[in-house]
Image: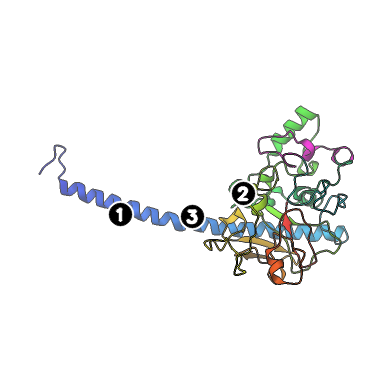
Amino acid sequence: MKLSQGFTVRELLVVLIILTLILFFISTLQVPGKRARELAMRVQCQSNLSAIGRALVMYQNEFKDKLPKPWNLTSSDDPDSPNWQGFGSAGRPGGDFNRLDQYDLDCFCNPDWYESVYSSDQSIQNVGLCLYLLIRNEGTDPKSFLCPSAENDIEMNLENISIWAQTNRGWTVEFWRDMNNFQSMYNLSYSYHDPWNTFGLDEDAAVMADKSHAYDTENGVRNSAAGDFPVQNPDGSWHDNENKNPQYGNSPNHQTECQNVLYMNSSVKRGQSPLTGVNGDNIYTYWTDDRTTDLYKSIGRWDKGRSQGRADSFLGN
């Protein structure tokens, strides 16, 4: 049978088959391409953490082996106290950080931040205040704090911040060192170990890693979707209760498949689960009261607590 356009049915079928095959091959090529890009971004993430690790070493050389922190903790040591300000609690209603398109919480670029903003409120602590000291004191590039695999995270725009600060507050912000903190938590892709303890951190313990799932929010408040993680299974194993996701609790940065981890000895390694600390310690949680068993070191808690020892990494925001 001949069609009016001059093509036979057989010819059209051949063309359709060829087009189908072409689309099939294109789709099969796209998956490896995306995978290759993700693997490349993981390498870049490791490079970022290595650069931060070098800055940490320089900072410790200058400040008597202390981890970066703006001051000593002055709030109550009791997590149930209303004055508690630790990982997992918001220092201010709505969090300590702006959303990406907002600047109203202006302490991040206030030149008198220490004398006026925090002088009566030094219990407020967050990871940004600590890690930004590496930018101010060691000249670390803010880009180093962005994991390329973190879908929501973007660079800060110094020009926009400078214009806003001058126009709305009369402040001069010319360089990154003129600021005190990250504008938004979406300008920071990594979690940091609790530095407000008196016993330091073991050389083989984790000090930074891809951002904890519990704190992956714009304004820095605890992610309510995190739930009461982690939950022990009846058989003592560590994953979601339905036993369907062995990466339960991983950072969201790398499709929840892994996290890159910076250790105190400056090495950077990739972990398939958060149990990558000393003796299988969960790097995102602090040990519970029973410190004698590996189970409690693995399960832990990640809200309103402190690191419990030199081998207990507690990475939060």
Q: Which residue is denoted by mark 1 in the rendering?
A: 21
- How many numbered discs? 3
Which numbered dot is residue 34?
3
Magenta segment: 93-117
Task: Tell me what residue is drawn at x 70 percent, y 36 percent.
Answer: 159
How far is the residue under mark 2 from the one under mark 3?
A: 27 Å
Find residue 89 and report its horizontal and vertical position in percent.
Answer: 75, 48
Count neighbours of disc 1 (C-alpha within 10 A) and say few if under 14, some if 14 to 19, many if 20 or more.
few
Tell me, yes or no, whether the highlighted magenta stretch contains residue 33.
Answer: no
Q: Quadrant of residue 212?
A: bottom right
Q: Which residue is denoted by mark 2 in the rendering?
A: 225
Disc on the earlier residue, 2 or 3: 3
- List the single residue furthest toward the top: 167
Task: Tell me what residue is drawn at x 68 percent, y 42 percent.
Answer: 156
The kind of residue tagged 2 is Ala
Q: As rendered, which of 314 and 43 lies closer to the eye?
A: 314
